[in-house]
């Protein structure tokens, strides 16, 4: 399960970075750079959680 969480985290970081740095369009009612920063922050937290979960799984000998 940590692998799937890590993939989602990396995807969230990537999409957030695209929203912040690579696009220049705006939409009504939302601040695009802020949404991108929030996505990157959530992705970083999820990546830390996945890394933490993976570390605990490898020390306990659990391979599932």
Image (cartoon, rainbow, N blue to C red):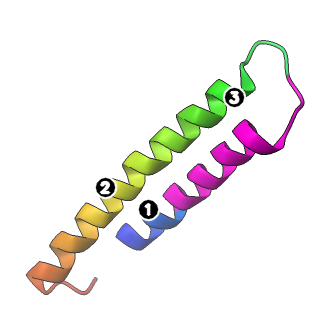
Q: Secondary structure at mark 3?
A: helix
Identify the image quadrant of residue 63.
bottom left
* Marks 3 and 2, how far apart at CA: 24 Å
Label 3, residues with CA under 10 Å away: few <14, some 14-19, many ≥20: some
Q: Earlier in the sequence, mark 1 or mark 3?
A: 1
Where, quadrant-wise, is the C terminus in this rendering? bottom left
Residue 61's spot in the image, x, y percent?
Answer: 13, 87
User: Disc 1 designates what residue?
Assistant: 5
Instruction: Please determine whether, in this image, residue 33 is positioned above or below residue 47.
Output: above
Which stretch is magenta? Answer: 8-26
53 in relation to 40, above or below: below
Residue 5 in the figure: left or right of residue 60 = right
Question: Which residue is under mark 3?
Answer: 33
CB atoms at circles 2 and 1 under 8 Å apart?
Answer: yes
**N-terminal of the two: label 2 or label 1?**
1
In terms of secondary structure, where does tag 2 sit?
Answer: helix
| Crowd rating for badge 2 (residues with CA inside 10 Å; few <14, some 14–19, many 20+) | some
Does residue 61 appear in this view? yes
Query: What x and y, as percent, mark residue 3?
Result: 42, 72
């Amino acid at each position: 399960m940590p692998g799937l969480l890590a993939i989602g985290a990396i995807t969230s970081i990537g999409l957030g970075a695209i929203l912040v740095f690579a696009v220049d369009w705006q939409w009504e009612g939302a601040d695009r750079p802020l949404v991108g920063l929030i996505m990157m922050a959530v992705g970083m937290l999820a990546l830390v959680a996945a890394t933490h979960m993976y570390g605990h799984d490898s020390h306990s000998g659990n391979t599932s």
